[in-house]
Amino acid sequence: MVELISFDRTQRMRRAWLGLAAWWAAAAATVFIPVAHFFLVPGFFAFGIYSFLQRARTAVVAVAVSGICPDCEAEQKFEAPARWSESVTLACANCGRSLRLTAPQPAV
Ligand SMILES: [Zn+2]
């Protein structure tokens, strides 16, 4: 079973701005940490921009992926990839087998 959330353009931009605001707030909060602020402030600032661009382009996100491994028959929840595509490669936590999961992209 795959549970997906799709975002239209307005929702993607809102999500992107919220992500940018969160990372830049973290950058502002770390200004007062001695020495570490030399790394944390530019790091959070740059990651905020990266996060904004990623979220602005991500139309579909998988929130839950679960199923039964065809090899060892263990039922499990898989770690969902950040951005969903039609074909995703996952690994079984029980036997380590590589599993390819295919699902059509929902209409946005
Ligand atoms: Zn398995």
Image (cartoon, helix red, strand yellow):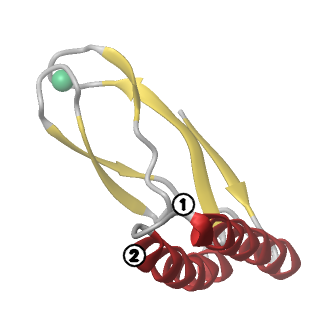
Name the side, left or right, on which 63 lies relative to 76.
right
What label does residue 39 carry, if any?
A: 2
Q: Which residue is mark 1?
A: 104
Give the class, few, some or many, for how many residues have Cα within 10 Å of label 1's Cα (few <14, many ≥20): few
In which quarter of the view is residue 32 placed? bottom right
- Residues at badges 1 and 2 in contact (C-beta under 8 Å)? no
Q: Residue at x 46, y 29 (%)?
A: 66
In which quarter of the view is residue 90 placed? top left
- Mark 2, secondary structure of its residue: helix
Q: Nearer the viewer, mark 1 or mark 2?
A: 2
Q: Position of residue 48 (x, y in %)?
A: 59, 78
Three-letter code for the amino acid on which mark 1 is drawn: Pro
Three-letter code for the amino acid on which mark 2 is drawn: Phe
**Whether residue 47 is situated above or below residue 93 in the rendered picture:** below
**Whether residue 25 is situated above or below residue 99 in the rendered picture:** below
Q: Residue at x 66, y 72 (%)?
A: 59
Q: Residue at x 81, y 81 (%)?
A: 9
Q: Position of residue 30 (x, y in %)?
A: 58, 65
